[in-house]
């Protein structure tokens, strides 16, 4: 390990407690928000979080160095933005809008600041239209990766930031399988790549079907209540 990497990792270790504090606050926001956690069917299904492990950080910095990018103690906190991450999972796509709205409200109230504008990653043209209606920048990925990313920090004076990802449970299944076989080194199996493409199409179909099921349920319950 190079001296630059050692010093950069040590700088991160010195700030880990601050990252843990901000991560705890982000988690409480999603876990306790009344709109997102109403019974009997909360909008948020589950939440995952992680704090970057120093050993994994060392490996990441080495991979960047191998590709010609030098990360030092002086630029690590502007070059690496995923020291902490929160993943918010929901059952179907219609539930995304209230999650997005609460994040926007949190920023509007001055509690968080966007490090960069929210971005939706997708491969599906219909999803592109859905996100664009919400004024979310959208990037089409030929890897079939699907998720909405937010990068927030507590204030302008603080370099600490948190990456928030929002996706459906169907998308999470695909993402976990893809991550397992393609990270940190992409598979060279053509069969696996093709199977991942097929799986993503099944995932997209499942998400649409889930939306249809819950829309039908809401219409049915509305008809019952109007009698």
Image (tube, grey):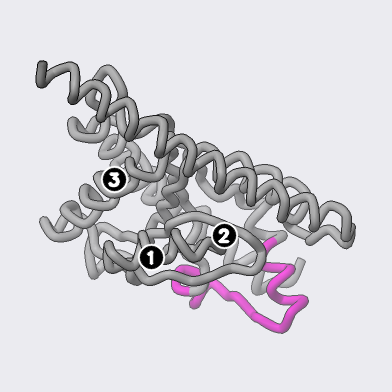
Alpha carbon separation for disc pair 3 and 2: 36 Å
What residue is rendered at 41% in x and 37% in y? Answer: 212
Residue 95: image location, x then y, percent: 33, 41
Q: Nearer the viewer, residue 133 or 39?
A: 133
Viewer-side label of 3, 2:
3
Query: Magenta stretch: residue 16 in it?
Result: no
Mark with earlier residue (3, 2): 2
Residue 160: image location, x then y, percent: 37, 60
Residue 165: image location, x then y, percent: 44, 51
Q: What residue did someone put label 2 on?
A: 10
- Image quadrant in which you'd find residue 107: bottom left
Q: Which of 109 and 205 is in front in this view?
A: 205
Disc 2 secondary structure class: helix
Query: Magenta stretch: residue 76 in it?
Result: yes
Disc 1 secondary structure class: helix
What residue is rendered at 40% in x and 45% in y? Answer: 93
Q: What residue did someone put label 3 on?
A: 99
Circle on res. 129 = 1
Q: What stretch is highlighted in magenta?
A: 60-78
Alpha carbon separation for disc pair 2 and 1: 44 Å
């Amino acid at each position: 390990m190079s001296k630059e990497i050692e010093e950069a990792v040590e700088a991160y270790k010195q700030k880990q407690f601050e990252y843990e504090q901000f991560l705890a606050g982000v988690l409480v926001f999603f876990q306790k928000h009344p709109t997102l956690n109403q019974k009997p069917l909360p909008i948020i299904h589950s939440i995952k979080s992680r704090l970057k492990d120093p050993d994994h950080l060392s490996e990441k910095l080495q991979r960047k160095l191998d590709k010609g990018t030098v990360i030092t103690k002086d630029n690590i906190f502007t070059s690496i933005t995923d020291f902490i991450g929160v993943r918010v999972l929901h059952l179907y796509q219609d539930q995304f809008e209230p999650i997005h709205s609460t994040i926007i409200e949190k920023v509007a109230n001055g509690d968080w600041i966007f490090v960069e504008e929210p971005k939706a990653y997708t491969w599906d043209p219909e999803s592109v239209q859905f996100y664009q209606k919400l004024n979310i920048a959208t990037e089409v990925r030929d890897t079939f990766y699907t998720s909405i990313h937010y990068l927030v920090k507590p204030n302008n004076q603080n370099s600490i930031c948190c990456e928030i990802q929002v996706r459906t449970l169907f998308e999470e299944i695909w993402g976990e399988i893809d991550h397992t076989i393609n990270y940190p080194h992409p598979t060279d199996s053509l069969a696996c790549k093709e199977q991942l493409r097929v799986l993503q199409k099944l995932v997209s179909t499942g998400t649409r079907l889930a939306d249809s099921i819950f829309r039908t349920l809401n219409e049915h319950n509305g008809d019952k209540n109007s009698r």
